[in-house]
Image (cartoon, grey):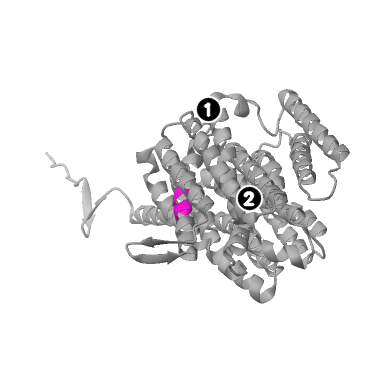
Amino acid sequence: MVQAHYRPPYCTIGRTPIFSSIKPSTVQRSLRCATILQRDHYTQIMRRYFIFSVVSLALFLASVNATAVSVAFPVIIPELNASLVLAGWVLSVYQLVAVSAMPLAAQMSEVFGRKSTFMLCVLLFTVGSVLCAVAPNVNLLIVFRVIQAIGGGGFLPSAAGIVSDEFPEMRQRAIGLFTSIFPIGAIIGPNLGGWMVASLGWRSVFWFNVPLGALVLILSWLLLRAGGGNRASGIDLVGATLLAVFLSAFMLALTELGNGRAGIPWMLVSLLIVLSIVSLIVFLRREQTVREPVIELELLRGRPFLGANAYNLVYGACAFGVFSLIPLYAVSIYGMSVFQSGLILTPRSIGMMIASTVTSFFLVRWGYRWPIVVGTLTIVLSLFLLALEPQGINVWRIHLNANVWLLLIMALSGLGIGISAPAANNACIELMPNRVATITGLRGMFRQMGGVISITTTTLLLQGIGNMQRAFSVVFISLALILLLSIPAVFTMPKQP
């Protein structure tokens, strides 16, 4: 009997067991494939974070632009020989146009894809910045701010869609960290803007956007994935136009009512109000019948959506809109220089950045509602303190002068925004997580709308009352009370992820 030859089931190379039946060339190919797969995995991870950095740079650019223009605002008024109300449109028209651009950009990103929409927005923002920098008068500056706002308004919904696609497993944290990008720009914007305005003139705040905008455009073309849209769907340009006409006519009517001329042109005001009402009615009827509406009315009527939209409208007015006029407040009430008025916003931005970063990491554990409530109450407190217009205070035998006290109030407001914003952003997305761009555009639209109303109404009161100190007090107290009354709407939003 021949003894069977025994072959061990595996042999070892070094300490690694290898099946004896596998050829060495096969082992080498397997190891090579594993190495390639591992390398591709790390490449994809790095690519995702590069993409996050690129879209964050666009948001950073928009944030720097908003705060730097606010610092330049007191200088633009005398240099372009403009009235306070007309010059106020340099700030408010940007937010007004962005209101219409946000839902439109969200719809475009669903139809044409995130990359095409995002790059178009960057291009329009950059071209608009060039035109603003060379504007010879305030009227053309306002027109060119419209072009800039179409691009800037589309940044947020298209960028949110890109990040949500790239980080599906950690969307809450990624979207929450977006909130910390804005205060970084808001730290640099006022300080850089104050220095540029004092050294190079107000036009330099617009030239600053051009090289960074070109860089974002190039990196977006290289890194972002093409496609991803649904070209079978349509774009509701008529609906977006009707929405813009409604808002523009309403704001122009307010401007005419408070322009300070000897007689109010009642005929023009009446026509603008009628145009605003008719545009709104036609817009609502169209959105009920059109196949691809720019705003789905279900996102306005449903109970959680209604509460979220109402809160975001008030939040935009109280947390963002009126704070655009803080440099003017600091210059006119406290006698600060333009550079100092830019510095006064820095503590607010630092508070926002720290609080939003911490909140983003603990959002899943804390839920959405209580961070929103705590942050909102903190903003309310800061508005009441601003209304007091303190000229100094003694704390533990240490005298804090008016400027230091104002810095502390700004830091407090920043903490409130940083605590509430990440939770509010994600709570809105949680209502329809498969439509991130759409919900982000809608949320941004209501916040920008609140900001526009806040800026326009404040400039009207400043000119109408005549006494800036009294007018600012009225504005701050009124907004604090309105924001306080909006808190019940928070409890209609989702409680947690």
Name the residue at 40% across, 54% down: 38
Q: Is residue 18 left or right of residue 445?
A: left
Q: Which residue is mark 2?
A: 471
**The C terminus sits in image quarter:** top left
Disc 1 is placed on an element classified as helix
Q: Is residue 167 visible?
A: no
Note whether 243 is above or below 355 in the view shown.
Answer: above
* Residue closer to the observer: 165 or 195: 195
Name the residue at 67% across, 38% down: 107
Q: Is residue 257 magenta?
A: no
Question: Could you tell me the amino acid type at mark 1?
Answer: Pro
Q: Which residue is mark 1?
A: 304
Region in magenta:
412-417
Residue 362 coordinates in the image, percent (x, y): 37, 45
Quick one: label 2, few (<14), some, or many (20+) residues within 10 Å?
some
* Residue closer to the observer: 325 or 442: 325
- Magenta stretch secondary structure, dominant: helix
Quick one: label 1, few (<14), some, or many (20+) residues within 10 Å?
some
Question: Could you tell me the amino acid type at mark 2?
Answer: Ala
Quarter of image, res 336: bottom right
